[in-house]
Image (cartoon, rainbow, N blue to C red):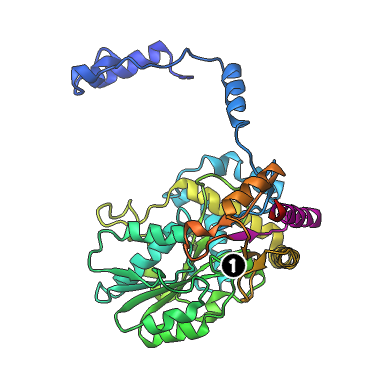
Amino acid sequence: MFVPNADPDREAMLKTIGVERIEDLFTDVPEGYRFPKLNLPEALSEMEAYAHLSELAQANSSVRDLTCFLGAGAYHHYIPAVVDAIIQRGEFLTAYTPYQPEVSQGTLQAIFEYQSLMALLTGMEVCNASHYDGATAAAEAVIMAYHHFRGKRTKVLVSHALHPQYRATIRTYMQGYTQLTITGDECTDCDPLAGPEVLLRAIDTNTALVIVQYPDFLGRIYDYTELANTAHQAGALFAIAVNPIALGLLKPPGEFGADIVIGEGQPLGIPLSFGGPYLGIFATRKEFVRKIAGRLVGETVDQDGKRAYVLTLTAREQHIRREKATSNICSNQGLMALASTVYLSLLGKQGLRQVAELCYQKAHYAADLISQIPGYTVCSNAPFFHEFVVCCPKPVSEINQALLEYGILGGFDLSTDYPGLKNAMLIAVTEMNTREEIETLRDVLEDISHE
């Protein structure tokens, strides 16, 4: 490890704080636990360490090596090179959280632009920047709704077609809210392919929030206007989790009457990564602006009348009220928001629509080919965007193992989260999949069915 301080530097620092040796700094640690002997291998040079790590990395396969038809919440999209070129500039890559506006105008403006673009995309009035991922944004929506009603409404209604990991994260976040009931997604004896209409009869005057997904986890597109109206008539809030790429083509959720829009921003210029960092989208209406967690940047003018940017309405941030803060936004999330801002700025309205149309058309081409293979059917008749459910003649785990032998990363095995969808695969197609790759998938699936 490279340590820049020379011995004279360390001696000066120790003298300043009044101790003789570095070991003296650890006297509060019980002696038996100080400086334990660690069973570590011999140190490696940088060149040796690089070679060793490269060898380890070769044990993994990525979407650079495989043809990918796996989505289920994280998607393989093309990322223009300029996205990385900009976010790796030192002033952004190493920037700390912008508490001091006088030295953070660049970061603050980038966040302001992100908020503006995302509000435009979702059809909402306010957007924060940001949450860790789509799942934590969903949990924040529940927290906001609960506190909006001051705990007097104790039911949150969640669609069974909301991403299973989002539902799990919501329950984890809400463990301490003992009065709150999270329901609607159990679906133990229901049709797993049922639409959102099953939620209608469950909405009542004790409902604080209704959450659905658009397109839903099974890739289907629904018009949620009736559901939103029913929720509002009961006095509840209505939240929609979105895929932002789909919004390049579909009606924005603000036009459904959504009170909160959440989602995963990874498709917007952020690479696939096992565990992130990803980007949690959170947008809402102006009337709720004082109740949301996360960072908000406002545009103003300085004492000379020049345009300037500042953090605003930070009552829930840790640097204002540590004990009551709910904000958990870190500098890294600012970098992910910047990546999506650069991505959206590069593509523009027409570019984003073109990406969305490519996803839509290619997915429907794939679904049409697969549905023609004996033994395979597209399970749902509902309109879909770029993911669809295929009922297969064999367990999906067997099919995916066989696909890997052809260099194909198959779809998501839905039986892991939906026991009623045995032998059902969720296939995702994006602009990255060529016509030849889709036709190869068709051919390999047909061969597998004969084995």
Q: In this view, does 295 lie to the left or right of 224?
A: left
Residue situated in front as seen by the camera: 254 or 419: 419
| Residue 295 appearing in the image | no
Q: What residue range appears in magenta?
A: 425-448
Residue 230's spot in the image, x, y percent? Answer: 42, 86
The residue sitting at 60% across, 45% down in the picture is 87
- Circle 1 — which element? loop
What's the residue at 36%, 16% (across, down)?
A: 10
| Residue 168 locus on image (x, y percent) | 39, 58
Residue 82 in sight in this render: yes
Task: Judge left or right: residue 379 versus residue 316.
Answer: right
Residue 428 among those drawn in magenta: yes
Q: Mark 1 points at which residue?
A: 219
Q: Amino acid type of disc 1?
A: Gly
Which is more toward the observer, 363 or 291?
A: 363
Q: In this view, does 233 lie above or below 212?
A: below
- 58 or 191: which is nearer to us? 191
Image position of 190 with respect to 32: above or below: below
| Occupied quadrant, residue 148 | bottom left
